[in-house]
Image: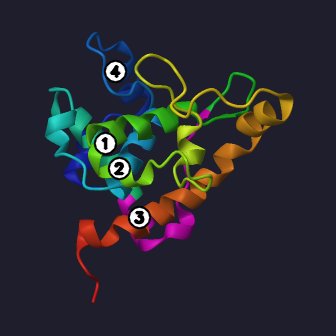
Amino acid sequence: MSAFDDMALSDEALEALMAAKTSRPLVRTMSALDGFVTAAVNGPRCPDPQDWMCPTDHAVFASVARIHNRINETLFDRPQDYALHFATKPSGGIDPRPWCQGFYAAMNLNIKKWKRLLDLDNPHHGLLPILIYCVDKKGKPVLGKPRPGPETAHFIEHEAYKDIALVIPALRELHYVTRYGNPE
């Protein structure tokens, strides 16, 4: 256990704090925070955490650092063990929306560096499985309205999120050299 771990809030306490904030934080749930930190760890370099974290006590910083370190260490040392932390629907199903919205919030901190991955005309768009669940500041779907029909609705509710686990290692590989230098 590190000093950060000793200071860190429990996931439940951190989520309660995020939900209770009067100023609008970028994320409000643990699932959204996990998505946010995953984007910060695996995408283009993210601004310094002090630039995007609201000024609160060290317990919150330690909690975010704990999540950052967990994601980074797992993807670096044991990528096969990395697991997405999606929310659960009241019915018991998986709800990827908060995680994806958190990922999208991190993207928006440095959206210019994400632009080359945002070619929405490319049907093999790498961020599609994440962005399909995201809404913009106006509450509109980032990718536009999905095609109408039961097949599309079923795919979005039960299938699309499964591809996110494939996107994260690919993002890490894509940005590895710019984040960590050439391994040779």
Residue 138, above or below 4: above
Residue 45, compared with residue 181, is above or below; it is: above
Q: Going by the image, does 181 lie left or right of 151?
A: left
4 or 3: tag closer to the N-terminus:
4
The residue tagged 3 is: 172
Q: What kind of residue is marked 1?
A: Ile
Residue 70 visible: no
* Residue type marked 3: Arg
Q: Is residue 68 left or right of residue 138?
A: left
Mark 2 closeness class: few <14, some 14–19, many ≥20 residues within 10 Å: some
Q: Amino acid at mark 4?
A: Leu
Question: Which residue corresponds to the image point at 73% horizontal and 29% vertical from the top-left?
Answer: 92
Count all numbered tags in the image, as a single digit: 4
| Residue 1 vs residue 85, the one in the foreground | 85
Residue 62 locus on image (x, y percent): 24, 42
Camera-near label (3 vs 2) is 2
Whichever of callouts 4 and 2 sits on the residue coming sooner in the sequence is: 4
Q: Which residue is mark 2?
A: 114
Pointer 4 residue? 17
